[in-house]
Image (cartoon, grey):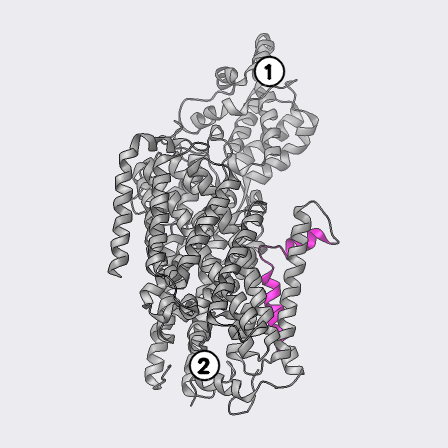
Amino acid sequence: MSRILNIFWVFILGIAASAAFADAAAKATQLEGEFKLGPAIILIIMLCTFVIVGLLNRAKDTSTYWAAARKISPVGAGMAIASNWMSAASFLGMAAIMYGSGYHGLSYVVGWTGGYVLLLVLMAGQIRRYGKYTASDFIGDRYYSRGLRGVGAAVAIFISFSYCVGQFAGIGLMFKWILGINYTWSIIIGASVVLSYTLISGMLGVTKNMQIQYVIIIVSFMLPLFILMHKFGYFIIPQLGYGHLVSDIVDGLDKVKGVTAMGHNFAILPSPEFAMPWDPSTGMSSFQWIAICFSLMIGTAGLPHVIQRFYVVPNANDARWSVVWGLFFICLLYWSAPIYSAFGKVLSASPEVGVLAKDAIVVYTAQLGNVFPLIVGLLAAGAVSAAFSTVAGLLVAGASAFSHDLYYKTINPAASERTQMLIARVCTILMAAAVALVALMNLGLIAQLVAVAFSLAGCTIFPLFLLGIWWGGSNRAGAWAGLLAGIGVSLVALIYFVVGKFGGTLPAQAFVNYYLNAWYFAWFGAPLAIIVNIVVSTATGKDTPEKIKEFLYHTVHGNE
Amino acid sequence: MGGTHSHEVSFFKPTSEHGKANKKLIIALVIIWIVCVFGFQALLILFAKPTPEANLISFETAWSGAAQSGATETVQKTLARTFLAVLGKNIAISADHKKVLKESLSATVLSLVPADQKAPFQETLAQNPSLAVTTAIQVIGLSGTGFDKIMANLLPSSLVPVASEEISAENKTALPAIMKLYCTHNQCGLTTMRFLGFPFHYWYTAQFLLILFVGLCLIYAIMIGRINRKFKFIEE
């Protein structure tokens, strides 16, 4: 731990030293297009820190690679959960949705935090007591089926894949902003760096890096907010003071409270659409609010890379407390994200600011608020850090699902440790390359792209875990039927989405786009998968092997 | 769900005292969770009604007045202000709707310009609309303070070349719906009440629910620890 602290201080000193480049860094006030030296230095120092930490904690074998040797404390694991969780979607995407769609965006804030309650009370301790390494390991074992393990692994890979797409989009935007290079190159460079780091370090490095990354993420996110609150005359503690800012937006603000970086007054005409529920101008309905919120919550409890975090704590009690700490650390950021959208709304109220990329509104807000350029740079580096920490975890989850569950458990049980490790690494490279390609297509806002992964997880993995843990009667046939129902709903939603995106039309396109939208189809898919699982399990009889029932009964639920 | 076999696991039919206590705790927390999250949104759905902004009421009064007895100067000034008030929402407005609003605003301003100045004003609008701002401020009657000042600052990017002082028939058809779309908001006591400076519903969703989630997790972690000790439940 002390080694990590030393590295963190080196990082801070490096940033302080880069203040020497303050003149050049002043270019950071350009909204776009120019190479920004100060932010670039901060980013490079940050990336070097991550690689050094990764090197110091590199994986020695597959057990280390997958489960970090179970040496992490609940607070440390909580920080890792938070860092793993707080991705580009949290750092950039939530503010973007609220900036564009007001109250509708709060469904993401609530959905991405409320799911932890379900995860904790229904699963965390039990998953740890079950004692498997990956989500598909659990599925294959609980439902005594190599086929289900294989399909579960494939689904886990696809979930990690779609989750990664949004992250790469965030990395691309921030590299573009900092380096002044085009989006394509910024994604290629960002993907290469995060890939190298993951390959070198494995999960142990990732976990330790995550603790450092959490501190960087939260400090970089909060610091500009304190400055903005002070600068524009609100109570300095952002989470307590921004209520008046929201009310100023709703009622209009005509008192001069300051000037933006572009010389406009910090003022706005009455704009209740920012805060009122499912405002007609946003085009979003109350049904969509609830569907997104529910889908994200259910998805949270089914995401393989989130579930996998419980394997890196020593026992079930630590698993539970790591969730409590993790959620608290997550909420520190989630309490703050709406503040960026609120300031962004006022600071970009003048049409002369032009049309800003919503997904970069966090950084633009700090710039327009005339925050010192190096602090804006730190903010952008924090966004990259948020995306990196999540991508690293996702690549490990995806690679381990392939090499451990698909290759070792399903295809070649005789594979050596060395071969498994090699397969995991090759898979990581292929996955990163494929994600980068899809990220280049610009299919949606970051938060929306990430929401797809949640709905997928909610329709497929969540029902298998929920019933697998809490009902001994759920059998292989029920699991297959439920999983296929979930996959079916997912396929319909995604096919309609992709066809619509490329200008095509299918029967009942408008109906499906509204009720089974790619961002929230789990509101229907998850309950359907659960019902199908229960019905088919009941209809096909109780054929769950006795040893699995005993294991559930004694080990997972601790009955005598 | 569940069965009678000694090794059957069912959430709803726990076989041990520890399991029963755990079930009660989980059900209590999940009910609180559901009611607080979705119950509150249901209240908003139930009580929040589409409510017009003052700006929409001004627009509708002026619009119907113009239709019935012709557009007086006062009516035209009111319309220009209402268009500006919507354009001030900036990022909330779609590009198509902005175009309609800008054209309608510019036509209305042109109609307010004295007859002998209309031609030069129209020429200025065609060549460099930002030079027409001073005249527009005067004819609309915008003062240099408060919301008027914000509206005045919107003019350079809101005035566009127009062929006539009449709002086009196409824009006339579109305007009422556009104004209604951007100036109607779902409101009720929960949204107008203020708490810590926030509209109450916003604070509840953006802050309280998150506090509640952390609280529920904390309570569960503490309570399950107590239940485990009470029933001598050894986890590992």
User: Which residue is outermost to the right?
Assistant: A507
Amino acid on which the number 1 mark rests in the picture? Ala
Tell me the residue at 48%/39% (across/down). Answer: A271
Asked if residue A454 shows in the view, the reply is no
Question: Residue B106, how many percent across, how many down?
Answer: 58, 22
- Element at badge 1? helix
Q: Quadrant of the N terminus of chain B?
A: bottom right
Magenta stretch encompasses residue A527: yes
Residue position marked by numbered label 1 in the rendering = B126
Query: Which of the two residues, A550 or B120, is positioned nearer the viewer here?
Result: A550
Residue B147 part of the magenta-drawn span = no
Taking the spot 59% from the left edge, 15% from the top edge, the residue there is B126
> Could you tell me which chain the residue with mark 1 belongs to?
B
Looking at the image, is B108 positioned above or below residue A291? above
Report the magenta residues as a range.
A508-534
A447 w.r.t. A177: above or below: below
Task: Say left or right for B186 vs A2.
Answer: right
Name which residue type carries label 2.
Val
Task: Give x and y (percent) for residue A195.
Answer: 46, 53
Element type where label 2 sits in the image = helix
- Disc 2 target residue: A556
* Relative height, residue A115 to residue A182 (above, below): below
Report crowding for label 2: few under 14, some 14 to 19, many 20 or more residues within 10 A (C-alpha).
many
Answer whether residue A2 is visible to the viewer in this image: yes
In the picture, measured across the screen, residue A299 lies left or right of residue A378, that is right
Mark 2 belongs to which subunit? A
Q: Residue furthest top?
A: B116
Q: From the top left corner, tell me how far across and down residue A275 is, in percent.
A: 47, 46
